[in-house]
Image: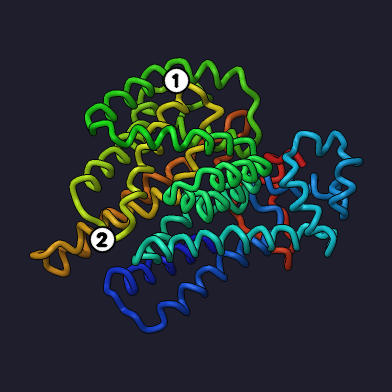
Amino acid sequence: MEYVLLLLLFLILAIAYDFLNIRIGKLLMYIFSCLILILLAGLRYRVGGDTSNYMHMYQYIPSNPIELLDNINSELDKREIGWLIFSSIIKIFSDEFLLFQMIHSIVVNTILFIFFAKNTTYRFTAIFFYTFILYPFFNFEILRQSLSVCLFVLFGLKYIEKRKWIKYYLTAVVCLTFHISSVVLFLIPLFLGLRKISNIKIMLLSTLIYASGSILGVYLISMINFSNAEALIVHKFFNYQEYQLSVIGVLTTYVINIFLPYLCLIFLRRNSIHTKKSLVDYLVVYIFISSISSVFPMLIRTVYFVTPVYIILLVEIIYSIVRRPGLFLLTRFFLYFKMLTIIFLLNSYFWFVKIEDTNGEIWLLRWVPYYSVFSMKVSPERESLLNH
């Protein structure tokens, strides 16, 4: 229920401040929205598949960062040093995981809200998309990678635009100390070189890569042991039942991760938008990472580095369409609501996919029901899915 109310709230705010262009209280409501999402994640109790793993790991992290060099044990030796230092510094002030997840929530959500505010006028629609596309992953699941993504959007994008390559690659190194998926940041400048390729060549090349990977990727997946969060992302990306090849799953994934971004790319190349033109180039990165991930499943998570940019571009496209002259207000609203609904449905269908090797539980159980630290209740159904 909490998530439904939040989505309705952000939808109403998007209609009021972005669609109807009401200005009264706009900044205050934006800050309030950020605060709500911070508290929802910061005050959760055992919500999220990988949250329990991080809670378990936290007890082994020393409260003195210097001790990390001498006390790396089997529980920590596979974790990145930047993440361990970050956690250790927080633990200086409290051994309770509550403080850690609150600070993590503040950092992640504040940075992303600042990013949306700087790059689009339609910031409430952006946070509406963020709530169901990225929020549960960044705050309940992939906690390490979400910090890397935030560092990239806060510093990396700026350094690429200004061609300050030393600073950019230093940022990439720092991101790598939080999560290994950040290795893709060293390749993004190379991917951006593909922006000069024509639309038709991008379509043909990405489709060819995806088609070949859809055949090989399933067999590669069966050979790799994924973590809970990684398995969820794999399932979201491929939409396979029991990881078996499905024609419907392949086509659905292709439409969501390649064809739709490709249509956005064509639109943005032919029409002017209010945000920075340089951000459009990251759609090419998004398309090729998605297609290559079908060949190398371990790259699936890397698409999240450019997903905040993709959200910005989706928002800009929607408003450039509904604000075209000659449309009646009712027609504008119908188009607006229709596009929001389609994007929501395309990005939420996987919530209801059954988890393999269970009694029919769906992925949504990892986040529903929501319990806070005030009640400290646990969901038996969710606990049965967790490692710790």
Q: Position of residue 163 (x, y in %)?
A: 45, 46
Which is more toward the observer, 252 or 139? 139
Residue at the image position 61 percent from the left and 64 percent from the top: 40
Residue at the image position 69 percent from the left and 51 percent from the top: 379
Q: Which residue is mark 2?
A: 319
- Residue 381 seen in the current view: no
Q: Which residue is mark 1?
A: 245
Residue at the image position 31 percent from the left and 52 percent from the top: 277
Q: Give the structural element (helix, strand or loop) at label 1.
A: loop
Q: From the viewer's perspective, is residue 137 above or below residue 126?
A: above
Q: Position of residue 150 (x, y in %)?
A: 56, 53
Total numbered labels placed on residues in the image? 2
- Residue 210 seen in the current view: yes
Chain-order first, disc 2 or disc 1? 1
Residue at the image position 64 percent from the left and 48 percent from the top: 143
Identified by mark 2, the residue type is Tyr
Identified by mark 1, the residue type is Leu
Disc 2 to disc 1, C-alpha distance: 37 Å
The quadrant where residue 73 appears: top right
Q: Position of residue 322 (x, y in %)?
A: 20, 61
Kindly identify which numbered label has been placed on residue 224.
none
User: Callout 1 environment at 10 Å: few (<14), some (14 to 19), or many (20+)?
Assistant: some
Q: From the viewer's perspective, is residue 338 above or below residue 190?
A: below
